[in-house]
Image: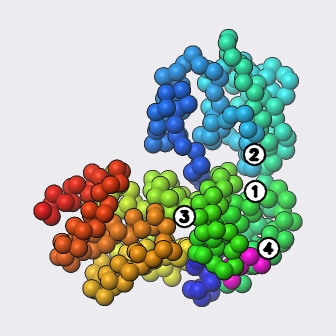
Amino acid sequence: MGFWHTGYEEHHQISSFWDSDQRLDLSVEYKCEHCGRSFQSADLLVEHRFSSHPYKSPILFVRKRQLGALPININTPLDPSDISIGCATSATLNGKKISLDELKLQLSKVRQDNIDLILSNHELTLRYRINFNISSEEDMAGVESEFLKLVEGKELTRSSIDKFISKAAAYRSATNYMDGLCEYFYGVLAKEGSGNSSLLQSKYREKFNRSAEQLLDYSRPLANFVKGLIAFHFNHFSEAGKFLNNGNLFKISGFYEQIFIGNDVEIEVCESLATKLLENILVDDETNLIINAFKFSDLSRVDLNNLDQESQSDKLSEFGRIKIKILMIKLYIKSKNEKKAVSILKELKGLSNLEPWVDQILKKIE
Ligand SMILES: [Zn+2]
């Protein structure tokens, strides 16, 4: 991970990065519970759910998460537009009847409360629990300043994370923010097979998912960047693009997004990392390897051989390996080594979402 080996010194610039928007939910698969169809985005699912199954049970989406029997936590104030209600004719909030429009308004005003909500239509009634614990600006800023101290320590170990937790715990309303950041750090430690982590390497996925979930409500640059990194890691490139908003990783994510929808695009050369602060400090080794490979449009044979070696490393995740192989195919074609390109293309052939691109390139070469 970046900040303990790059020696980046200008942390004081970080304060200028703290503000922005956007969220994502990696843990949710956008699948219709009634017909099983999958959708590319939560918006499409919401639209489908409301238009195709109008006579089913009530349905409630909060920030594009569909609510079920399990309670959810809300950490930043809701906007009425964050709430979508379908197939319901009446609502009861904490025991009082309320109109659906008024309900949205009321929910957007809650700060600290555990809400009991009932939605009904003529046939069915569903009950939801929403726990509001809104983080104050001071507490979120407090967690971020403790995060900076962790960065300045240039060491990511269990004990440096423990120290971060014990300091940041003072900012009580932002506990989930702190937790989301920690889960990312623990995930990175596990993934990089650090002797410092007590977790199995394969556990990192759980940690990354939990991090994305805990950070879901937080639309701040630090939170967004972590969510973007996680989405990028899992090859969810359109979601990654939403959170990364610009910079090298945003461009690289856009490159892969196009390849995964079957458009052959060319590699854009990356700028130096020195000016990209969050990239500098938060990127894990695997993502760092990918960014570095994008820095040169013409890799020498030696560089390509090195990249080839790295792509075999068992430290690499399957998601990272695919990204590196795609990159190598492009680089081999560029250096007129079609034979090598074809052999990697054949390795990728079984992956259904890459098939259109793989077929297209094979056709071009052969
Ligand atoms: Zn459906």
**Which residue in the protein does label 3 denote?**
229
Q: Secondary structure at mark 1?
A: helix
**Which residue in the protein does label 1 denote?**
176
The residue mark sitting in front, 4 or 2, is 4
Using the image as rendered, state which of residue 338 and residue 22 is in the foreground: 338
Q: Position of residue 151 (x, y in %)?
A: 68, 79
* N-term-proximal mark, 3 vs 2: 2
Q: CA distance from mark 4 to mark 2?
A: 24 Å
Residue 281's disc number: none
* N-term-proximal mark, 1 vs 4: 4
Q: CA distance from mark 3 to mark 4?
A: 23 Å
Instruction: Name the magenta segment's main secondary structure.
Output: loop
**Which residue in the protein does label 2 denote?**
73
- Specify whether 215 is left or right of 168: left
Q: Position of residue 178 (x, y in %)?
A: 75, 63
Does residue 12 sit above or below 172 in this rendering? below
Residue 54 showing in the rendered view: yes
